[in-house]
Image (cartoon, rainbow, N blue to C red):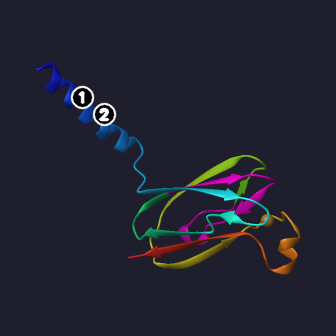
Amino acid sequence: MARKIFMMIFAASLLFSHIANSQDASFDIKAAKDRWEPSSITIKKGEKVSIKFISVDVDHAVELGEFGLKKVLIPEKDSVTLEFTATKTGTFSFPCIKYCSWRHLVGARPRLEIKVVE
Ligand SMILES: [Cu+2]
């Protein structure tokens, strides 16, 4: 009996943790001057996505305009988490939009590519 109750509580806690953290996909992106890593991620249309951008050096910034998000700063040695639902398919490229190194001057900004598939 005690075991049955324990199993029920365990199952309920699993359910609640899922509801509390109801993202379908989450990613950590390491943002550095030369490269964002991983530089490409693939998600499914309709998924709730959480992306944590973690700066390992200086300020960076990103704007996921295709997903209805405004420009956000990824502060120096800090992080910012963006959440959105991918409502359309395609391949979208999001370069750094805050000057972080000379790479901005030569068309080689670090970037994140997001592929949304059916
Ligand atoms: Cu930059």
Q: Is residue 65 magenta?
A: yes
Foreground residue, 80 or 87?
Answer: 80
Q: Is residue 41 left or right of residue 13?
A: right
Amino acid found under the numbered disc labelled 1: Ile
Residue 62 higher or lower than 7, as above or below:
below
In this figure, which residue is indicated by the disc labeled 1? Answer: 9
Ligand 1: does it lie within 8 Å of the C-beta at label 1?
A: no
Q: Residues within 10 Å of mark 1 (few under 14, many from 20)?
A: few
Ligand 1 in which quarter: bottom right
Rendered residue at 69%/62% (across/down): 71
Residue at 75% x, 50% y: name it.
Answer: 75
Q: What residue is shown with label 2?
A: 13
Tell me the quarter of the picture where residue 109 sits: bottom right
Which element carries disc 2, helix, strand or loop? helix
Q: Is residue 19 left or right of residue 5?
A: right
**Residue extending farthest left:** 1
Residue 9 image offset from top left, x and y in percent: 24, 28
Tag 1's secondary structure? Answer: helix
Q: Quadrant of residue 107?
A: bottom right
Q: Is 87 in the magenta?
A: no
The quarter of the picture where residue 47 lies is bottom left
| Mark 2 touches mark 1? (CB < 8 Å) | yes
Residue at point 63% right, 75% down? Answer: 93
* CA gap, disc 2 and disc 1: 6 Å
Mark 2 is surrounded, within 10 Å at the Cα level, by few (under 14), some (14 to 19) or many (20 or more) other residues, namely few
- Total number of numbered discs in the rendering: 2
Depicted 87 relative to depicted 28: above or below:
below
As drawn, is 61 to the left or to the right of 47? right
Residue 17 in the image, given as x and y percentages of width and height: 37, 39
| Residue 23 rendering spot, x and y as whole percentages | 43, 53
Region in magenta: 50-71
Q: Amino acid at mark 2?
A: Ser
